[in-house]
Amino acid sequence: MFDSMNATQGQSQEPAEPAPDVRVRGEAILYRLHDVGYEIDLDRVFDLLGASAPERPRPVRGEALAIQIPNPPVTVGLGVESAVVAGVAREVELSACIFDFGVVSLRARLAAPTDLPWREFGEFGLAVAASLQWRELFDRSRQRLLKLIGAAVERPGEAPVSEDYVVFRVSNLTDSAGARLAADALRDEDVARLLVGERRALSAAARKELLSQRFTYFEDDLAVLTWNAALVVEPVAEDNDVQYVLEFANAQLLELRHFDAVLDGELPRIYDRIAEARHGFPGVGRRYGRLLGEMQARVMDSTELVERVENSLKVTDDVFLARIYAAALEIFRGRTWRSGIDRKLAIVRDAYAMLNAESQARRAEALETVIVLLIAIEIVLALLRH
């Protein structure tokens, strides 16, 4: 599943062993996101999931007032299942987060054994990422969820693209005597190897690039972001704000990727339809009219959805969570996806303008021909009367 985590980032000599007294209490949270429709009525979803105790949480930090979410997503528990990780059966807590712009995010949470040495926690992370059971588990969860909320999905349809992400959450760092350690007790090479999923040591250049998006607010917290994984050190159990904004950014990324793919497939069809319309009978305008209507609807749908996605979370101040959110969008190349969509929509608009002008010209030519014929008929009738 998370194959991209195994990409080799560089090679160097093995570093010294990590400090033996660094022990960790943590978990791995795997995300798989799917686009399941054009829009989801979250109020209806909340009612449909009433028996499952759904929630609509927001970030809890005081600074979260700088983050505006007009229509908070709905979260719901999906029960507990079992998965084999490194040959050991472990409990997996399943849940989902449902966004109004048509995305559902499925989560699988696995607690690591308590007080693992950091190296063993890294091995746990590698084993979690390498497990082959996630696809089947997530597929079952998605099907079960869609049966429950299907009535709230407008224009349902599952997109061929999906998005995967994993968060390694650490709630406690201690030494062998149980004394609490600050987040800076973790060495860069240890963090980098966990997030990339490599057993070999990374080069200094690779580590520097990988850990460039590193954030801390208190002495005991830390967030390190990469393309497909993040490390979150947060001792406050109720504080899931970093995961909240990362999941939001992943949902937005998926939607941009989906509509980029939709437009990629739509452009060749538009060109074929234009060619077909041009080879039709010159006097027939209905074919042009239908095609123009379809093109206009596609532009409107795409523009509306992209705007809805981008307005689903707004940042009004440069605070800790806002910086993490902005960094995630930058890592995910959100601007690149958006510019690609804008460029393809511009092509559709130009084709619409060209086709509309050609349609108007054909109508004008047809009208001129009718007028000339009427004049000729009038002249002939006049001559016959004389």
Image (tube, rainbow, N blue to C red):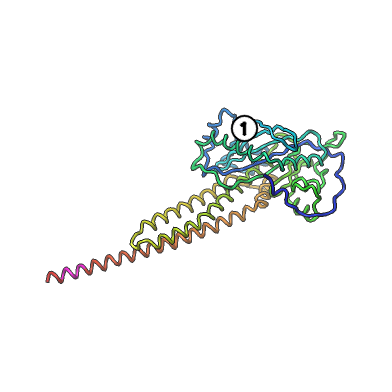
Residue nearest the observer in this picture, 274 or 212: 274
Residue 247 % position (x, y): 64, 43
Q: Is 295 above or below relative to 18? A: below
Q: Residue at x 26, y 68 (%)?
A: 372
Q: Quadrant of the N terminus?
A: top right
Q: Secondary structure at mark 1?
A: strand
Image quarter for residue 171?
A: top right
Does the magenta run of residues contain 337?
no
* Residue at the extreme left of the image, as rendered: 386
Indicate left or right for 173 with 276 as reference. right
Per the image, the residue denoted by label 1 is 78
Q: Is 312 above or below relative to 88? A: below
Total number of numbered discs in the rendering: 1
Residue 224 % position (x, y): 74, 46
Indicate left or right for 330 with 201 as reference. left
Q: Quadrant of the C terminus?
A: bottom left
Q: Is 214 above or below relative to 241? A: below
Which amino acid type is marked by label 1?
Leu
Residue 135 % position (x, y): 64, 41
Indicate left or right for 288 with 170 as reference. left
Residue extent of the magenta highlight: 377-382
Q: Residue at x 35, y 62 (%)?
A: 281
* Residue at the extreme top of the image, as rendered: 51
Q: Is 91 above or below relative to 288? A: above
Residue nearest the observer in this picture, 20 or 99: 20
Residue 273 % position (x, y): 44, 58
Residue nearest the observer in this picture, 146 or 214: 146
> Of helix, strand and loop, which mostly describes the magenta segment?
helix
Q: Is residue 62 visible?
A: no
Does the magenta run of residues contain 378?
yes
Q: Residue at x 62, y 56 (%)?
A: 336
